[in-house]
């Protein structure tokens, strides 16, 4: 009998960092499934160096449950690890390795459950959906969802197994990552007032982000289930200028919005704000511009507390009250693409994710195994 621990050991050994190919890991997964009589389908990217994987165990009917996770992990560069990050290493109750918590622990438990599922007769199907490039903006899940939304008999529930210490999370904020490109007019620094300094446009824009943030904090939508109970704005990088004696013509700000449901439209407000800033300079400098481009975005998750799917989750695991999480996941994309109630629930703690000496407690894997055991009983009916 293969254990979840053994599968995790295999998965951790693939350095499936988002910058690298995940094909070796996907090959391992599809081989694991094939050995248990489970057919899987790969959905490769255009370059053919990455793929997501979908599989169904049991009959092709509605009312199943979909388990989802991402196969990529964040890099280890600049981190000091006590043991090899790509070799699962046990110390006490803790299992160390890159991705142990985020989120190969859940993938291992899911594969193990798929193997058990294949050995019994299910009345309702178990679906697997493994993505790539989650860590760089939920990239790989999108073509997979396009296919699933057309071909998958509608499940009753999706579980995205990001680490929640096996609590049931029914909400997280959405994210919009964007850049503001500021265009001024170049000139000699000795004649600075005759030019338009792009850094001035950039700092005007930052001022504006801060003003909007203050307004939202004072009077915006609130949800006390979150650490920061409102939509946040953040500028993470500002660049511009070439040399001290040149008035810079170009500057750029990378910023993000972590939004509550409904606050997606804030990006349009910022766009209008940005053109108003540029407009203020245009009578003198006709080329002045502050242009906003969205780099990446994913929707928030907001699962209806009254949904039957939550009552179903309660039968699977005694997790206490549903919570909301600070980090983003693919769950909002699943919910909107498939129209299926979606929760985030998986083993391990996100506090360990993305850090050196990332680990998962062995007991967390056991708890996930037990939850999936109950799930299989439910699906077997
Ligand atoms: Zn993750």
Image (cartoon, rainbow, N blue to C red):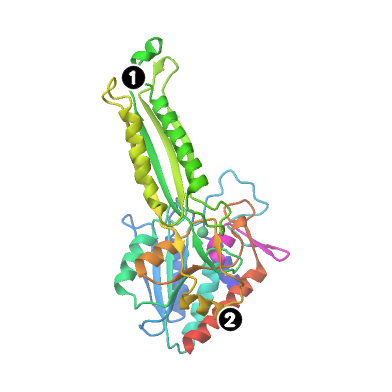
- What SS does tag 1 mark? loop
Q: Nearer the viewer, residue 168 or 348?
A: 168
Q: Could you say where residue 26 lies in the image, as x and y percent from the top left?
A: 44, 65
Q: Is residue 255 visible?
A: yes
In the image, taking residue 322 as reference, residue 338 lies left or right, namely left
In the image, taking residue 99 as reference, residue 339 lies left or right, namely left
Q: Calculate the distance from the C-alpha at mark 1 to the C-alpha at mark 2.
A: 69 Å
Q: CB of residue at label 1: within 8 Å of ligand 1? A: no
Residue 96 within the segment the image draws in magenta: yes
Q: Could you say where residue 63 lies in the image, as x and y percent from the top left?
A: 40, 81
Tell which tag, 1 or 2, sits nearer the viewer.
Answer: 1
Q: Could you say where residue 145 lies in the image, as x and y percent from the top left?
A: 35, 65
Q: Nearer the viewer, residue 310 or 255?
A: 310
- What SS does tag 2 mark? loop
Extreme residue toward the front, this view: 219
Q: Is residue 101 above or below residue 19?
A: below
Q: Is residue 326 above or below residue 6?
A: above
In the image, taking residue 364 as reference, residue 306 lies left or right, namely left
Q: Is residue 223 above or below residue 177?
A: below
Q: Nearer the viewer, residue 165 or 310?
A: 310
Bin the neighbour count of mark 2 within 10 Å (Cα to Cα): few under 14, some 14-19, many 20 and up.
Answer: few
Q: Could you say where residue 171 lies in the image, as x and y percent from the top left?
A: 50, 62
Q: Which residues are magenta?
A: 89-105
Q: Which residue is mark 2?
A: 1
Q: Which residue is mark 1?
A: 186
Bin the neighbour count of mark 1 within 10 Å (Cα to Cα): few under 14, some 14-19, many 20 and up.
Answer: some
Residue drawn at (47%, 37%) of the image: 211
């Amino acid at each position: 009998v293969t254990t979840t621990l053994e599968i995790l050991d295999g998965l951790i050994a693939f350095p499936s960092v988002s910058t690298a190919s995940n094909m070796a890991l996907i090959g391992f997964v599809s081989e694991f499934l094939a050995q248990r009589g489970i057919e899987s389908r790969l959905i490769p990217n255009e370059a053919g160096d990455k793929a997501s994987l979908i599989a169904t165990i049991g009959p092709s009917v509605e009312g199943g449950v979909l388990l989802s996770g991402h196969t990529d992990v964040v890099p280890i560069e600049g981190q000091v690890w006590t043991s090899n990050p790509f070799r699962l290493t046990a110390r006490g109750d803790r299992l160390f390795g890159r991705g142990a918590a985020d989120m190969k622990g859940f993938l291992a438990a899911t594969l193990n459950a798929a193997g058990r599922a294949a050995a019994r007769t299910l009345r309702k199907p178990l679906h697997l959906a493994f993505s790539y490039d989650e860590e760089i903006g939920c990239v790989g899940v999108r073509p997979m969802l396009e296919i699933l939304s057309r071909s998958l008999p509608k499940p009753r529930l999706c579980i995205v197994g990001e680490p929640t210490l096996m609590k049931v999370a029914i909400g997280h904020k959405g994210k919009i990552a964007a850049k503001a490109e500021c265009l001024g007019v170049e000139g000699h620094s000795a004649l600075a007032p005759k030019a338009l300094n792009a850094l001035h446009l950039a700092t005007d824009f930052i001022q504006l982000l801060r003003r909007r943030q203050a307004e939202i904090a004072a009077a915006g939508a609130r949800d006390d289930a979150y650490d920061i109970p409102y939509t946040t704005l953040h500028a993470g990088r500002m660049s511009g200028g070439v040399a001290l004696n040149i008035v810079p013509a170009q500057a750029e700000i990378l910023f993000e919005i972590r939004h509550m449901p409904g606050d997606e439209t804030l990006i349009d407000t910022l766009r209008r704000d940005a053109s108003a800033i540029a407009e203020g300079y245009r009578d003198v400098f006709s080329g002045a511009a502050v242009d906003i481009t969205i780099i990446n975005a994913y929707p928030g998750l907001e699962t209806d507390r009254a949904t039957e799917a939550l009552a179903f989750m309660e039968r699977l695991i005694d997790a206490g009250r549903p919570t909301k999480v600070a980090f983003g996941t693919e769950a909002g994309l699943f919910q909107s693409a498939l129209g299926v109630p979606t929760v985030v629930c998986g083993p391990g703690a996100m506090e360990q994710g993305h850090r050196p000496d990332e680990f998962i407690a062995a007991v967390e894997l056991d708890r996930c195994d037990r939850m999936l055991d109950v799930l299989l009983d439910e699906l077997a009916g």
